[in-house]
Image (cartoon, rainbow, N blue to C red):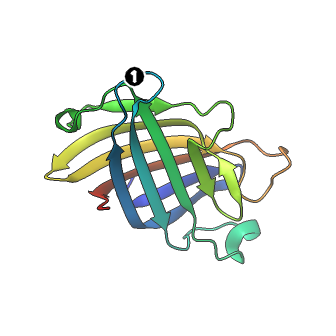
Amino acid sequence: MEEQILYLSRFCGIETYPVKQAVWELIEGDGTEEDPDMLCLGMRFAQGNHLHEDTRSLQAEPFWEINFYKTKIPMNILQIGFDLEQPNEANEADGSFYYLEHQPARNNRMEILARDGNRLKIRVSGSTEDVNYYDGSKPENRLQLTAWFEKEHP
């Protein structure tokens, strides 16, 4: 798998979308279960390549947002090997994939592969309902990405 490319595995094959922007932000809570720290990942993509018949004419530029929670996430722990999961099983807004409309992104995982100052190389994966069939008639799409994320500045 190439970096800076979203791989969208659908029932009809794999579509790819180049990364336009990948950012991360750490929002501190008070360190309790009720107000944990939150690592936010935001990813925007250009129009896809290797599109299938049913998505070729849509000219979609998807985006994917995930909020990962942990009681405490100190900045110095954001190093190689740090990983988090966000199942988003209840279809909450903690993981969202937008293609033609917002869909819950489930089974989200992230792992830091490298760090260069405030830039983090992160592998992200998840799943969502098929991007062109919202009736549950197709299997879930698998989302996979390895990219460099820039620290988002307020």
Q: Nearer the viewer, residue 101 or 130?
A: 101
Q: Nearer the viewer, residue 47 or 24?
A: 24
Going by the image, does 28 lie left or right of 9? left
Given the current orientation, which residue lies at the most extreme front position?
Answer: 30
Q: Is residue 5 above or below residue 83?
A: below
Given the current orientation, which residue lies at the most extreme left position?
Answer: 117
Percent of width and height locating residue 107: 56, 34
Percent of width and height locating residue 113: 26, 41
Mark 1 neighbour class, 10 Å CA radius: few under 14, some 14 to 19, many 20 or more: few
- Quadrant where the image shows the C terminus: bottom left
Q: Residue at x 47, y 42 (%)?
A: 67
Q: Residue at x 55, y 70 (%)?
A: 48
Q: Is residue 16 above or below residue 145?
A: below
Residue that mark 1 sits on: 32
Percent of width and height locating residue 93: 61, 44
Q: Is residue 134 above or below residue 34?
A: below
Callout 1 secondary element:
loop
* Quarter of image, res 15: bottom right
Q: Nearer the viewer, residue 6 or 104?
A: 104
Q: Residue at x 35, y 44 (%)?
A: 27
* Quarter of image, res 59: bottom right
Percent of width and height locating residue 101: 71, 61
Q: Is residue 22 above or below residue 96?
A: below
Number of residue marks = 1
Residue type indicated by callout 1: Thr
Going by the image, does 75 lie left or right of 84? left
